[in-house]
Image: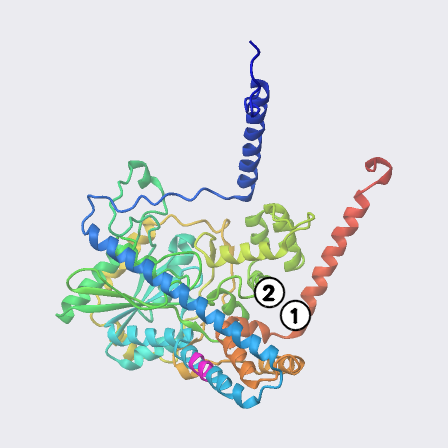
């Protein structure tokens, strides 16, 4: 019997064809994975959720749900606002002859928003907030610890703050020489003999290896062998504060003040033996006062850094400015620092050839460290940032000589010196300092760099002394406003931009802009000369007969 024909063809395929299709699919998926790996996209991790053993699980889930609802409501509100703005724009486009009276309320609302933003920016001015917090710390503390960098102690002293403390009469001022392990022992002893004639001085080296707050970390036996983990001078400072507390007969508050990157927060962490205060390489991490109880009788207060006056020298602004490296021009700042250092010792320390100017040093340093731009040219800016970060950080060893003859500060006299020394056991302090100097293993004179100090660094305490703009910046902004008059004719917009720019700029940047233009022209000419020299060398090195194929 003849087999009847099937109505539909069979969907079966040969195994060869099926395996071929599967192979193509695998190859396609592999290609997609490679592309995703190159882009750096990773699979989002699945939220494990709140475990059943966690306390208050229901409350946490309820809070998460409420947070999710608020975010959704906020998104919906933003979407509606966008739709309303688009409808207004469409109406204005369709009806060009709309009367200006309809647009006046919109302008009024916009002006009110601007005035509110200006008021907020005026209230939250960072420099004024720093002044307020610093005043609070000085007023509430019985003893003020002024932290100095042992590499440049004179440059870390602020005469305005010292004068304000001395004029109060009831507060004690103590100097703390931090980072003393980066200075030769002989130089450290000379500075100690110079400073103790005026105020009680403590030799200190903060520890860098500390356990986090609330966490117990098991320290291995090998960890004690590292030199930088050990804190030196803690016992001497404890005894000094404890003896003063006993003489007072009441609980005392100790304020810690100083310029940025001198190690104020590190000293507090070393005394508490916990990482309570934020510590880092970048300047100006502490932005508000922080109260830390050491024991029942002594409370220590961390404070924000001093605000550097723009009237200081360029070297003081480069070393003591609370701005980050990206804000100030790094080449100018690093070249100013380099001009104050001994060139021979700099060459030996960084293992670079002898240089005639700062730009030549930065090019050789960039080549030495492998800092190159696209095309193979040395990255001078990154080399300048590297030098600046090492100089302001806690790794490079350099030192300054104390003045040959001791001259008391104008705000100090015999009476004020005796008042500051009253209540402290100076004999025991000398013994502890001698023990600390012996315990510290500082570098030798040959391996450290001699630096010429710029003297005392002026700071700003009063809020009224904070200058918004320099006259040079005002002229520049007026010229920019005249050029941009066709684009934006509203004077309120110009005022708002000026306020925003003045709040973003720091006093160090203003001072750099106020420097004479001749120095900048010399640096630019030197830079062009070095680049031309490099291009000539590259052209001479290339030979078409041998290299070109």
Question: Which is nearer the N-term, disc 2 or disc 1?
Answer: 2
The answer to whether residue 44 is left or right of residue 502 is left
Residue that carries the numbered disc 2 in the rendered image: 332
Nearer the observer, 114 or 226: 114
Residue extending farthest to the left is: 249
Nearer the observer, 24 or 275: 24
Residue 448 in picture, x, y percent from top left: 49, 52
Residue 276, quarter of the rendered image = bottom left
Give the Cα separation between the discs numbered 2 and 1.
9 Å
User: Is residue 116 located in the magenta-colored stretch of the structure?
Assistant: yes
Residue 350 in picture, x, y percent from top left: 56, 49
Q: Which residue: 57% across, 53% down?
A: 346
Residue 248 in picture, x, y percent from top left: 15, 71
Residue that carries the numbered disc 1 in the rendered image: 519
Residue extending farthest to the bottom is: 101
Q: What element carries label 2?
A: helix
Instruction: Using the image, determine if residue 533 lies above or below residue 542.
Output: below
Q: Which residue: 20% across, 70% down?
A: 423
User: Is residue 233 located in the magenta-colored stretch of the structure?
Assistant: no
Residue 501 seen by the camera: no
Residue extending farthest to the right is: 545
Q: Which residue: 65% across, 58% down?
A: 359
Q: In the image, which residues are magenta?
A: 112-117
Nearer the observer, 192 or 385: 385
Q: Split into 4 quadrants, where in the image is the C terminus? A: top right
Q: Which residue: 39% across, 79% down?
A: 123
Instruction: Using the image, determine if residue 296 lies above or below residue 418.
Output: above
Residue 68 in picture, x, y percent from top left: 33, 58
Is the residue under label 1 in contact with that under label 2 (CB below 8 Å)? yes
Residue 380 seen by the camera: yes
């Amino acid at each position: 019997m003849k087999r009847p024909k099937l109505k539909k063809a069979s969907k079966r395929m040969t195994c060869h064809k099926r395996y071929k299709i599967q192979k193509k699919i695998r190859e396609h998926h592999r290609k997609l994975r490679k592309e995703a790996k190159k882009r750096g996209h990773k699979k989002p991790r699945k939220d494990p959720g709140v475990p059943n053993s966690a306390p208050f699980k229901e409350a946490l889930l309820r809070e998460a749900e409420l947070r999710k609802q608020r975010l959704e409501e906020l998104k919906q509100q933003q979407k509606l606002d966008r739709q309303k703005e688009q409808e207004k724009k469409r109406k204005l486009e369709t009806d060009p002859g709309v009367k200006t009276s309809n647009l006046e309320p919109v302008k009024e609302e916009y002006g009110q928003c601007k005035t509110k933003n200006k008021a907020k920016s005026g209230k939250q001015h960072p420099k004024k907030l720093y002044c307020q917090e610093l005043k609070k710390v000085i007023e509430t503390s019985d003893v003020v610890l002024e932290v100095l960098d042992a590499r440049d102690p004179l440059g870390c002293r602020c005469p305005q703050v010292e004068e304000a403390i001395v004029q109060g009469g009831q507060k004690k001022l103590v100097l703390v020489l931090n980072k003393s392990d980066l200075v030769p022992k002989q130089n450290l002893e000379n500075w100690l003999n110079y400073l103790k004639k005026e105020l009680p001085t403590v030799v200190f080296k903060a520890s860098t290896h500390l356990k986090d707050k609330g966490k117990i970390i098991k320290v291995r036996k090998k960890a004690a062998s590292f030199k930088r983990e050990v804190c030196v001078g803690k016992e001497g400072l404890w005894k000094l504060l404890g003896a003063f507390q006993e003489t007072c007969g009441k609980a005392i508050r100790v304020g810690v003040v100083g310029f940025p990157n001198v190690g104020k927060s590190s000293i507090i962490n070393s005394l508490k033996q916990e990482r309570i205060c934020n510590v880092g390489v970048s300047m100006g991490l502490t932005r508000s006062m922080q109260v830390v109880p050491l024991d029942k009788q002594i409370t220590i207060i961390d404070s924000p850094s001093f605000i550097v006056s723009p009237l200081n020298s360029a070297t003081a602004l480069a070393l003591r400015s609370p701005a980050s490296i990206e804000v100030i021009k790094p080449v100018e700042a690093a070249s100013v620092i380099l001009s104050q250092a001994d060139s021979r010792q700099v060459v030996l320390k960084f293992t670079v050839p002898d240089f005639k100017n700062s730009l030549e040093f930065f090019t050789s340093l960039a080549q030495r460290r492998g800092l190159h731009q696209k095309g193979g040219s040395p990255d001078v800016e990154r080399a300048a940032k590297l030098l600046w970060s090492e100089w302001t950080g806690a790794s490079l060893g350099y030192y300054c000589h104390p003045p040959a003859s001791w001259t008391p500060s104008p705000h100090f006299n015999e009476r004020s010196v005796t008042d500051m020394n009253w209540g402290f056991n100076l004999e025991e302090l000398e013994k502890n300092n001698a023990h600390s100097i012996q315990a510290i293993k500082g570098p030798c004179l040959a391996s450290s760099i001699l630096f010429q100090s710029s003297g005392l660094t002026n700071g700003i305490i009063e809020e009224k002394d904070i200058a918004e703009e320099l006259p040079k910046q005002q002229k520049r902004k007026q010229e920019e406003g005249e050029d941009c008059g066709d684009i934006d004719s509203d004077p309120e917009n110009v005022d708002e931009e000026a306020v925003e720019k003045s709040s973003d700029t720091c006093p160090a940047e203003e001072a750099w802009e106020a420097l004479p233009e001749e120095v900048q022209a010399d640096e630019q000419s030197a830079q062009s000369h070095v680049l031309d020299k490099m291009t000539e060398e590259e052209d001479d090195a290339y030979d078409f007969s041998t290299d070109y194929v």
